[in-house]
Amino acid sequence: MRSKLVEQFTEERMTAVDAVIAEYREQPGALLIILEKVQDVTRYLPVELQRYIAWKLEMPASRIYGVATFYSYFSLVPRGRKVVKVCSGTACYVKRAEEIKERLKQKIGVAEGEVSADGEFSIEEVRCLGACGLAPVVVVGEETFGLIDPENVGEILEKVSS
C-alpha cells in the first residue's frame, strides 16, 4: 500500500505523512489535525492516501472519506501550492467574476481544477467568500483581493508570486 503512494508522493513526503500520523494518533479527536497536516505535505488527499491513513489509525476508511469530503478545506484532487479562489456569489457574479476567472485561467495557463506546470497555481470557483462589500473577490492563500477589475488580474498574480 505504501509503496504505491511513494511512487505518487515520494519517499520523503510519505515519511512526513507517517510522522504526522505518529505524532497525533494517540490524541482523541485528532483526525482533522492529521488530515490538515497530511494535506499540507501532499497538497491533496486522494482515496488511496485516505485508505492508508485509515489503516495506520485503525479506523474505517469511510470515516476518513466522510471527513475529507465534508470540509471544503480538503481536496481529493491535486492543487497548486497557491490556490486561487474566485468568488461566484451573486454580488461577485454581477460584477464580472466569470470574466475574472477566465482571465486568471489564461494568465496561469490552466483550466479550473488543474495545476500549473510548475505546481504553483490552481484555480477554484467558490460560492461565497463572505466579502460581498468588496465584490468581485479573489482569495489566494490568506490574501484577499477585492474590487477587482478584470483588466488587472495579472497584478494579483504578481503580488502573490513575489
Image (cartoon, helix red, strand yellow):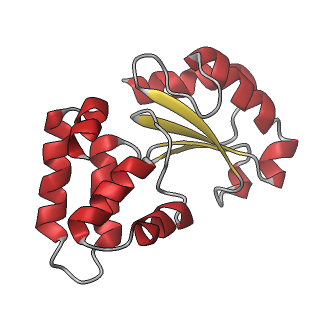
* Rendered position, 12 above or below 29: above
Quarter-of-image position of residue 5: top left
* Rendered position, 134 above or below 124: below
- Tell me the quarter of the image containing the C terminus: top left
Inspect this view and state whether residue 149 appears. Answer: no
Seen as rendered, the residue at the extreme right is 94
Inspect this view and state whether residue 156 appears. Answer: yes
Seen as rendered, the residue at the extreme bottom is 28
Location of residue 67 in the rendering, given as x and y in whole percent from the top left corner: 47, 68
Location of residue 25 in the rendering, given as x and y in whole percent from the top left corner: 18, 72
Residue depicted at x 49% and y 48%: 76
Location of residue 101 in the rendering, given as x and y in whole percent from the top left corner: 70, 31
Depth order, front residue of 83/117: 117
Residue depicted at x 72% and y 54%: 127
Depth order, front residue of 111/145: 111
Residue depicted at x 20% and y 51%: 17
Location of residue 154 in the rendering, given as x and y in whole percent from the top left corner: 59, 19
Residue depicted at x 84% and y 53%: 90
* Rendered position, 78 above or below 2: above
Depth order, front residue of 122/101: 122
Depth order, front residue of 5/86: 5
From the viewer's perspective, is 80 left or right of 90?
Answer: left
* Rendered position, 130 above or below 44: below
The number of numbered badges drawn on the structure is 0
